[in-house]
Amino acid sequence: MSKLAAPEVVEVVELLGLTLGTGLVSSVGLYLEDLGLNAVTGGNLKLGAWFLGMGLVALYIGVYLLGYETLRPRLFGDDSPDGDAA
C-alpha cells in the first residue's frame, strides 16, 4: 500500500467506526426508551423514569453529539455544525 493511500484508508475506517458507533448508541437509546415506557405502563414508575432518562441521554449522545455534530460535518465536508458555509 502506498503512503499516499494510507490517510484515505484511515479516514474511511474512522468514518465507518463513527457511523457504527452513532447507530449503536442511538439504538441503545431507543431500546432504553422502550423499556422505560413498558416499565411506566406496568406500574414501576421509578425504574421507568430511570430508563427514560438514560434513553434520553443515549439518544442525545448518539443523534446529536455523534451524528449531527461529528459525523455530518465529516461526511459532507462542511466545518460549521449547522451547515452554513459562511
Image (cartoon, rainbow, N blue to C red):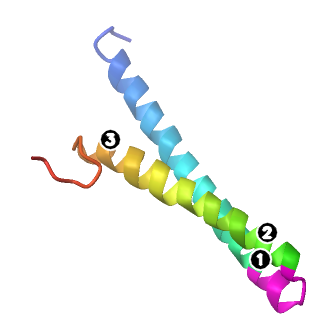
Front residue (pair 61, 53): 53
In the picture of the structure, the residue carrying the numbered disc 1 is 36
Q: CA distance from mark 2 to mark 3?
A: 33 Å
Q: Amino acid at mark 1?
A: Gly
Tell me, yes or no, whether the highlighted magenta stretch contains residue 30. no
On residue 1, the disc is none
| Callouts 2 and 3 close, C-beta under 8 Å | no
Query: What is the residue that sits farthest to the top in this orientation?
Result: 3
Residue 17 location (% of width, % of height): 52, 39
Name the element at disc 3.
helix
- Left or right: residue 35 compared with residue 84: right
In the picture of the structure, the residue carrying the numbered disc 2 is 50
Residue 68 location (% of width, % of height): 39, 54
Q: Amino acid at mark 2?
A: Trp
In the image, the segment drawn in magenta is: 37-45
Residue 9 location (% of width, % of height): 39, 25
Q: Main secondary structure of the magenta part?
A: helix
Indicate which disc, 1 or 2, sits on the residue closer to the N terminus: 1
Q: Nearer the viewer, mark 1 or mark 2?
A: 2
Indicate which disc, 1 or 3, sits on the residue closer to the N terminus: 1
| Callouts 1 and 2 close, C-beta under 8 Å | yes
| Residue drawn at 78 percent across, 75 percent down | 49
In the picture of the structure, the residue carrying the numbered disc 3 is 74
Q: Quadrant of the N terminus?
A: top left
Mark 2 surroundings within 10 Å by alpha-carbon count, few (fewer than 14), some (14 through 19), many (20 or more):
some
Name the element at disc 1.
helix
Name the element at disc 2.
helix
Residue 18 visible: yes
Q: CA distance from mark 1 to mark 3?
A: 33 Å
Residue 27 visible: no
Q: Amino acid at mark 3?
A: Arg
| Callouts 1 and 3 close, C-beta under 8 Å | no
